[in-house]
Image (cartoon, rainbow, N blue to C red):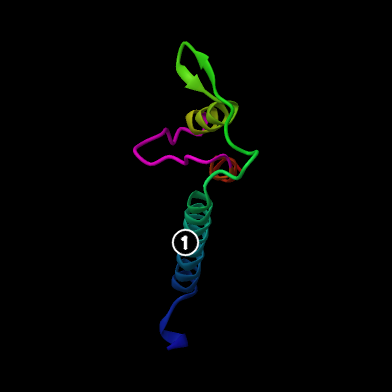
Amino acid sequence: FDWYISDFSKALIVKSLECIMVVFSIAGTMWVLEGLGDLEGYADQYMLSGMGEISFFQMVYFTFMTISTVGYGDYSPTTVFSRTFIVF
């Protein structure tokens, strides 16, 4: 089969598989981090503001999502470790 596939097709297949593996790796990591929940001592510290109760980690996450133009939607991390992982 090697001579039936062009170099471009091979490169496209490899890059597609790499992309899929990255997505699965990130999704799996987020699933584990969300499943663990907040560890003791690492929970958000909330303060009351004009926007409601907010935390530093929420604002970092919100700022990163806004600047990167991906926005925010129905699904968003709820733990500090998950938000930190997503930002970096």
Q: Nearer the viewer, residue 13 or 36?
A: 36
Residue placed under numbered mark 1 in the picture: 24
Work out whether residue 85 or residue 1 is closer to the camera in this orientation and state it. 85
Residue found farthest to the bottom: 1
Tell me the crowding category of disc 1: few under 14, some 14 to 19, or many 20 or more residues within 10 angstroms, Cα based.
Answer: few
Foreground of the two, 7 or 26: 26
Q: Main secondary structure of the magenta part?
A: loop
Q: Residue at x 45, y 15 (%)?
A: 51
Q: Is residue 76 left or right of residue 26?
A: left
Image quarter hosting the C terminus: top right
Is 72 part of what is drawn in magenta?
Answer: yes
- Give percent across and percent down for residue 48: 51, 15
Compared with 57, 32 (above or below) is: below
Residue 68 part of the magenta segment: yes
Which residue is outermost to the left?
A: 74
Expressed as whole percent of the image width and height from the top left, the position of residue 83 reads 54, 40
**Which stretch appears magenta?**
67-80
Quadrant of the image for the N terminus?
bottom left
SS for tag 1?
helix
Name which residue type carries label 1. Phe
